[in-house]
Amino acid sequence: MILKLEHIYKDYIQGKMTVPVLKDVSLHVEEGEYVAIMGPSGSGKSTLMNIVGCLDRPTSGSYELAGEDVLSLSENKLADVRLNSIGFVFQNFQLLPRMSALDNVALPLVYAGVRKKVRRERAREALVRVGLEERISFNPSQLSGGQKQRVAIARAMVNKPKILLADEPTGALDSKSSAQVMELFSKLNEEGVTVVMITHDPGIANHAKRVVDIFDGEISERGEAVQ
Ligand code: ADP
Ligand code: MG
């Protein structure tokens, strides 16, 4: 099992109040699955994604990633897990504005200590895979929303992580660009990448092979994705 979250609770402290956001969330994902976590705004999706992505820690509960108890790891070790095991895609792309598509995609390889020539080769290959070979020297401001998201997907995958984690990946895109992003996710999943995608949109969730609903910080499993 690649993701094993059990009895996860997350509270935020607001002044003197404790706000419970995740309430006894247990989620098991096998390697190679394509899961959508779907729920309305404010239901706790991003809070859950931040925990799955080792960007935040739960208030209580347990979490094993590929058999490793990640909650016991130091911040440095968690940074290694994020760098090597997980590719992140966000609604607002999170590209660096003054860098070319190629340099944006190569950035995780800088942190991974890969030398420059190899970085550029691998970043180029990743951009070719998302259909952007003609845009490698463009800055984000010279790209459409859909192209920016494809750059972000290339960056997420350049380190060849086993898990792709996406928070509202089509939230800022038109329907044609959204369809292209969904096509890429399916392709990556067919190649063996475990995909966990967070969305409020049932039409997007239905691209996944399994849909988990989240409502008011509690999750429930569906028998089958609704067509
Ligand atoms: P979603 O991504 O489903 O829209 P979030 O996980 O972002 O939901 O937020 C869930 C709830 O947690 C919301 O009520 C939000 O106000 C609250 N929340 C999120 N982050 C914080 C924070 N850092 N401090 C306090 N409350 C937060
Ligand atoms: Mg959110």
Image: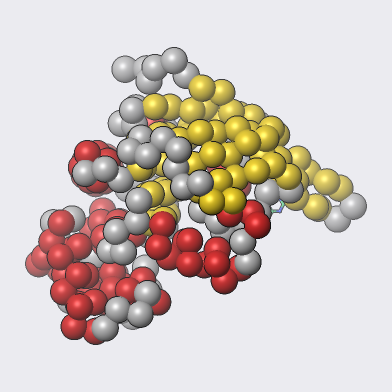
Q: Residue at x 35, y 35 (%)?
A: 33
Q: Which residue is drawn at 18% across and 83% down?
A: 117
Q: How is the image coloured?
A: secondary structure
From the viewer's side, name the closer residue of 20 and 75: 75
Residue situated furthest right in the rendering: 16
Image position of 149 (left or right of 223): left
Question: Is residue 52 visible in the rendered structure shown here?
Answer: no
| Image position, residue 159 (x, y; %) | 31, 64
Q: Residue at x 24, y 84 (%)?
A: 116
Q: From the viewer's perspective, is residue 83 above or below residue 40? A: below
Specify the quadrant that holds the N terminus.
top left
Specify the quadrant that holds the C terminus.
top left
Image position of 227 (left or right of 67): left
Q: From the viewer's perspective, is residue 72 above or below residue 10? A: below
Q: From the viewer's perspective, is residue 154 above or below residue 42? A: below
From the viewer's side, name the closer residue of 208 and 119: 119
Q: Quadrant of residue 87?
A: bottom left
| Image position, residue 172 (x, y; %) | 38, 49
Q: From the viewer's perspective, is residue 219 above or below residue 85? A: above
| Image position, residue 104 (x, y; %) | 31, 72
Question: Is residue 116 visible in the rendered structure shown here?
Answer: yes
Q: Residue at x 16, y 70 (%)?
A: 124
Please give the count of numbered marks on the rendered protein: 0
From the viewer's side, name the closer residue of 187 and 170: 187
| Image position, residue 19 (x, y; %) | 78, 43
Q: In which quarter of the image is residue 204?
A: top left
Q: In which quarter of the image is residue 161?
A: bottom left
